[in-house]
Image: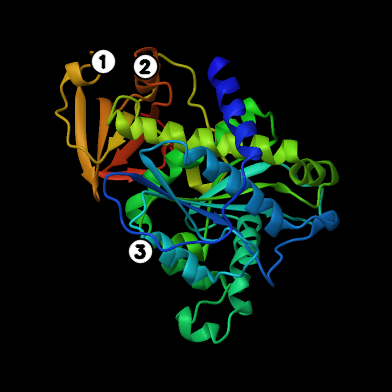
């Protein structure tokens, strides 16, 4: 509670500080943690205007407040894709982040829908598993049509064509785990601290995420088309609270990196659907002392880190049977090794009790990572 009050105090102080209105050239600073904050839309691109509210203004206010809080930390460097009401191309936003050699890219938006949909959701790059996720990505990507000669800049990418999204996931593949980790930290703050309706962590084909070379997330803070939520997001209180949640998520992510592996953990996005839906719909095996799945190995994932750490018990709070695998540029650390799903669930509880509260079960078949939910649909032996 004291920490929460401290965050609020810092943000309230910052609200009274003037924002610098002109950007200046930046130089890479290898000694700092670089965060690029991207306020969606701007200039002649207003974003959505549900109930008369302006997405471009709300997103900018939230981003500036998050940035001011982060700038109070001497080891953090904040770069903005825009600090005023100007139009920035999607490729320009990605270029700013890449030129800065940033550690994180966070894009802030507001949602819209013709239904009574409401709530906050945080996206990482991936193939959208349903029409709703496609429509959200399509809406944000259509800003390219406002650019002159857009066809020559986006290699034939068509926001209206689902097929155009297939190639987008490759560039961000190495950063998916870290992006998901950050997305979960931000989303948890929205739902646990602010009690916003939880629309979960999702994957969809956002061009601006595709073209960044670092962990990247896109935050949809809520729906301006839902009257009470639009009013909340348009208010100083709402913008301040949403800024606080994003700020805390970034700081928690950085703290985890600073600790290397101590709690460098994240929750899995199952089948690109909302985390909450995946949990609610998880298929349970029949109650028995064993639930063995032949040709399947279950493990408990504890952590992911760019640092190579010896899989010894003293590095993992006394847990035995630790294994390490390298995927891309990162190492993943696992606890346990069993074909019994009931047993691995018990191991996950042990890991949580040892200080890994977000440990989760993963499955492998023939050495390849597979979805746990798909394994559980098949009969156990």
Q: Is residue 317 left or right of residue 310?
A: right
Secondary element at image label 2? loop
Q: Where 2 falls versus 165 (above or below)?
A: above
Determine the CA span between mark 3 and mark 1. Answer: 39 Å
Which mark is first along the chain, 3 or 2?
3
Can the viewer see residue 374? no
Secondary element at image label 1? loop
- Of 43 and 104, nearer the camera is 43
Question: On the image, numbered disc 2 is attached to which residue?
Answer: 355
Question: Which label was assigned to residue 99?
Answer: 3
Whole-percent x and y of residue 182?
45, 40
Q: Is residue 283 left or right of residue 325?
A: right
- Of 26 and 376, nearer the camera is 26
Q: Where 338 falls versus 177 (above or below)?
A: above
Whole-percent x and y of residue 140?
62, 64
Query: Do callouts 1 and 2 mark residues in contact (Cβ within 8 Å)?
Result: yes
Secondary element at image label 3? helix
Determine the CA span between mark 1 and mark 2. Answer: 8 Å
Question: Which residue shows up at 54% across the image and 42% down it?
Answer: 68
Question: Which label was assigned to residue 317?
Answer: 1
Q: Where 43 falls versus 9 (above or below)?
A: below
- Of 293 and 327, nearer the camera is 327
Query: Do callouts 2 and 3 mark residues in contact (Cβ within 8 Å)?
Result: no
Which mark is first along the chain, 1 or 3?
3
Question: Which residue shows up at 60% across the image and 50% down it?
Answer: 19
Determine the CA span between mark 2 and mark 3. Answer: 37 Å
């Amino acid at each position: 509670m004291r920490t929460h009050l401290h965050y609020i105090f810092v943000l309230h102080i910052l609200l009274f500080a003037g924002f610098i209105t002109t950007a200046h050239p930046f130089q890479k600073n290898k000694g700092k943690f670089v965060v690029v904050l991207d306020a969606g839309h701007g200039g002649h691109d207003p974003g959505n205007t549900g109930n008369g509210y302006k997405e471009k203004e709300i997103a900018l206010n939230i981003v500036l407040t998050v940035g001011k809080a982060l700038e109070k930390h001497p080891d953090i460097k904040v770069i903005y894709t825009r600090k005023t009401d100007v139009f920035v191309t999607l490729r320009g936003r990605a270029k700013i982040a890449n030129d800065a050699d940033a550690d994180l890219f966070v894009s802030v938006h507001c949602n819209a829908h013709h239904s009574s949909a409401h709530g906050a959701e945080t996206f990482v790059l991936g193939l959208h598993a349903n029409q709703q996720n496609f429509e959200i990505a399509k809406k944000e990507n259509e800003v390219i049509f406002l650019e002159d000669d857009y066809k020559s800049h986006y290699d034939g990418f068509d926001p209206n064509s689902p097929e155009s999204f297939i190639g987008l996931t490759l560039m961000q593949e190495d950063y998916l785990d870290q992006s998901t980790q950050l997305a979960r930290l931000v989303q948890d703050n929205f739902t646990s601290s602010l009690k916003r309706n939880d629309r979960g962590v999702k994957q969809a084909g956002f061009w601006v995420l595709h073209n960044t070379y670092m962990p990247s997330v896109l935050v949809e803070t809520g729906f301006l088309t839902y009257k009470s939520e639009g009013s909340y997001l348009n208010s100083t209180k709402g913008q301040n609270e949403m800024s606080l949640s994003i700020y805390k998520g970034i700081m928690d992510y950085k703290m985890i990196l600073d600790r290397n592996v101590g709690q460098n953990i994240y929750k899995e996005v199952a089948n690109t659907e909302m985390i909450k839906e995946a949990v609610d719909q998880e298929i349970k095996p029949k109650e028995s002392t064993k639930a063995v799945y032949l040709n399947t190995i279950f493990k408990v994932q504890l952590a992911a880190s760019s640092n190579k750490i010896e899989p010894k018990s003293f590095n993992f709070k006394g847990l035995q049977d630790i294994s390490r695998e390298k995927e891309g540029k990162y190492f993943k650390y696992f606890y346990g090794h069993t074909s019994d799903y009931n047993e691995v669930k018990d191991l996950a509880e042990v890991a949580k009790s040892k200080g890994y509260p977000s440990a989760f079960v993963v499955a492998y078949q023939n050495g390849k990572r597979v979805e746990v939910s798909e394994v559980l649909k098949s009969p156990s032996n």
